[in-house]
Amino acid sequence: MEFFKSSSKGKVVLVASNKPEALVLDRAKKFGVPTFVFTKKEMETGILEERLKQDRVDWVILAGFLLKIPESLIRSFPDSIVNIHPALLPKFGGKGMYGAHVHQAVKDAGDKETGITIHLVNEQYDQGRIIFQAATPVYEEDSPEQIAEKVHDLEHRFFSQVIDSLL
């Protein structure tokens, strides 16, 4: 929201979440961006899709969203739903691989690097076309929390810029 508040390419027109306690909802209000809270069932039955169309959304940007996107929503926004994943896909992707689970898996595997993957969303978890990746080293002494911090830095450095380039 900060990045796009003065952009000539696009703006955030809605922040939607299936978690009423999500901090992003409070942040959106501070930026004057409308919010919408929905249930999994409402997403599956098309209520979320209706709201996105009503608000004339062109791109759906996911960040920290864990539910599988229904095929009808994917069809309504072809090649226009973008997700960010906290690993270098195809490694450490798929159902259940998010947040701390990913960082622990990277640590357990002894990988020497990790990073972020920004990708289009398709019908399979974390298997859409990769748009961008950025890597960071992982050292033997790094804890999962330290790995998470490095990944978080990459997310903040690149996500908005990559979205901007898509617009």
Image (spheres, helix red, strand yellow):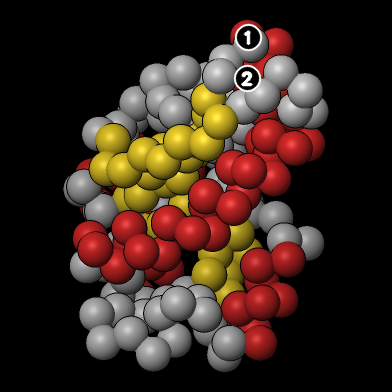
Residue 110: % across, % down: 64, 11
Q: Which amino acid, mark 2?
A: Val
Placement of 11 over or under 108, stated as above or below = below
Residue 16: % across, % down: 54, 64
Q: Which amino acid, mark 1?
A: Ala
Q: Badge 2 is on which residue?
A: 106
**Could you say whether the residue bearing mark 2 is in a helix, strand or loop?**
helix
Q: Badge 1 is on which residue?
A: 109
**Which label is found at residue 155?**
none
For the residue carrying disc 2, how many other residues have a C-alpha within 10 Å: few (<14), some (14-19), or many (20+)? many
Placement of 3 over or under 100, stated as above or below = below
Of residues 30 and 16, the one nearer the viewer is: 30
Q: Are marks 2 and 1 in contact (CB under 8 Å)?
A: yes
Question: In the picture provided, is 124 more to the left or to the right than 151?
Answer: left
**How far separated are the C-alphas under marks 2 and 1?**
5 Å
For the residue carrying disc 1, how many other residues have a C-alpha within 10 Å: few (<14), some (14-19), or many (20+)? few
Instruction: Mark yes or no: residue 94 visible.
Output: no
Q: Residue at x 71, y 18 (%)?
A: 140
**Total of numbered circles in the picture?**
2
Instruction: Mark yes or no: residue 55 visible.
Output: yes
Question: In the picture provided, is 106 more to the left or to the right than 88?
Answer: right
Question: In the picture provided, is 128 more to the left or to the right than 84?
Answer: left
Of residues 148 and 28, the one nearer the viewer is: 148
Q: Residue at x 66, y 77 (%)?
A: 27
Residue 134: % across, % down: 41, 41
Q: Residue at x 63, y 43 (%)?
A: 150
Of residues 48 and 163, the one nearer the viewer is: 163
Of residues 30 and 52, the one nearer the viewer is: 30
Placement of 16 over or under 119, stated as above or below = below
Q: Residue at x 63, y 9 (%)?
A: 109
User: Quarter-wise, where is residue 69 in the image?
Assistant: top left
